[in-house]
Amino acid sequence: MKPMGMIDKITPDLLRGVALGLLGAFVLAIMSYHLTVFIFRKRFPVPPKGGAIVITGASTGIGNHAAQYLARQGYIVYCTVRKPADVEAIQALGLPNLRPIIMDVAQAKSIENGAETILADLSKDKRPLIGLVNNAGVAQKFPLEFHPLTDLRSMFDIHVIGPLELTQRLLPAIRASKGRIVNLSSITALVLLPTGAAYGASKLAVEGISDGLRRELVDFDCSVSIVQPAYVNTAIFKKVTQSIDTKVEVSPEIMSTYGYFFRTEKRIKDRAAVDKASPPSVTTDAITHALTSPYPHTRYIVANVSGIPAFWLGWLVWLCPDRLADFIMGKFS
């Protein structure tokens, strides 16, 4: 008689049992995580209404939405923008608590001038600086083999070096008021997708700096939080939609090597994911909680990817072996 191999022993009941076991382990892991977070949560002083908050990259999108909301809640919000036209657009909103500041976080001199203007204004008004939201960002999508290094350096200046320089300049004032720092990362720091690895790497650097700052500032009662959004319906994603609709020009060399990532079906899938993007209120809620709650979280995973809540996707990838995670990510790329 033919000996029974391992494949022959796999039955539907066994598969159901394995699936239920994995589901149970997944649920138990999440419950354990939240219980641990609750047990070890730390209470911070609640910043006063009327204090000042600096938000970078506030001309549109996540930064602009959060700035308007916080201004309406009674906070003075310094909105950094790059163009005089953006200053006029913010002033046209008619919100007296919004104070636009020209600043390019990729330029050291611009950061220095902007920070000096903010600090001088705060000193004149005798107003505490209770929060800094490092939000300014840029999106780039290339296979790593062909990613222009000048663009890559610029992206790290905007996402990493510039925000850290601004933080260094404003930190004494934040520390004096026991204020908060909120750094915008991305779900791509957890879930690195093909053609988005460089962007994700810059956000991983943001997370490393944020974790270090959080541990260095804990004795000063200064909270540091990370917001990790997935797809949010903002101007940057409208640009993604436009590029999908118009078929962005890709060099023949890239197409011949990595054409899979730029094929028509892929663009249709990307468009579907962008169409399901969450409203910017999800990031505003996270930023507001991080700035004002007595128990701010260290991380906020918000929005969705192709309709799947980013929180669940992050957990799934974290729990999976790398090869399985690669397979899952292939379904989103």
Image: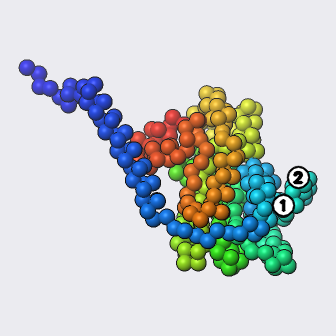
- Tell me the quadrant of the picture where the N terminus can be found: top left
The residue at the point 68 percent across, 34 percent down is 275
Q: Are marks 1 and 2 in contact (CB under 8 Å)?
A: yes
Provide the residue designation for mark 1: 98
Which amino acid lies under the numbered mark 2 shown in the image of this protein?
Leu
Task: State how the image is colored.
Answer: rainbow
Mark 1 → mark 2, Cα distance in angstroms: 9 Å
Left or right, 290 with reference to 97: left
Instruction: Work out whether 230 lies above or below 246.
Output: below
Question: Which x, y percent locates residue 237?
Answer: 71, 42
- Residue at the limit of the structure toward the top, as seen here: 1
**Element type at mark 1:** strand
Question: Which x, y percent locates residue 153?
Answer: 67, 60
Instruction: Work out whether 282 lies above or below 161.
Output: above
Left or right, 46 with reference to 32: right
**Element type at mark 2:** loop
Which amino acid lies under the numbered mark 1 shown in the image of this protein?
Leu
The numbered disc on residue 93 is: 2
The residue at the point 70 percent across, 58 percent down is 135
Numbered circles on residues, count: 2
Mark closest to the chain's N terminus, 1 or 2: 2
Looking at the image, can residue 10 be seen? yes
- Tell me the quadrant of the picture where the C terminus can be found: top right
Looking at the image, can residue 259 be seen? no
Mark 2 surroundings: few (<14), some (14-19) or many (≥20) residues within 10 A:
few
Give whichever of 100, 47 is nearer the camera.
47
Give whichever of 248, 253 is nearer the camera.
248
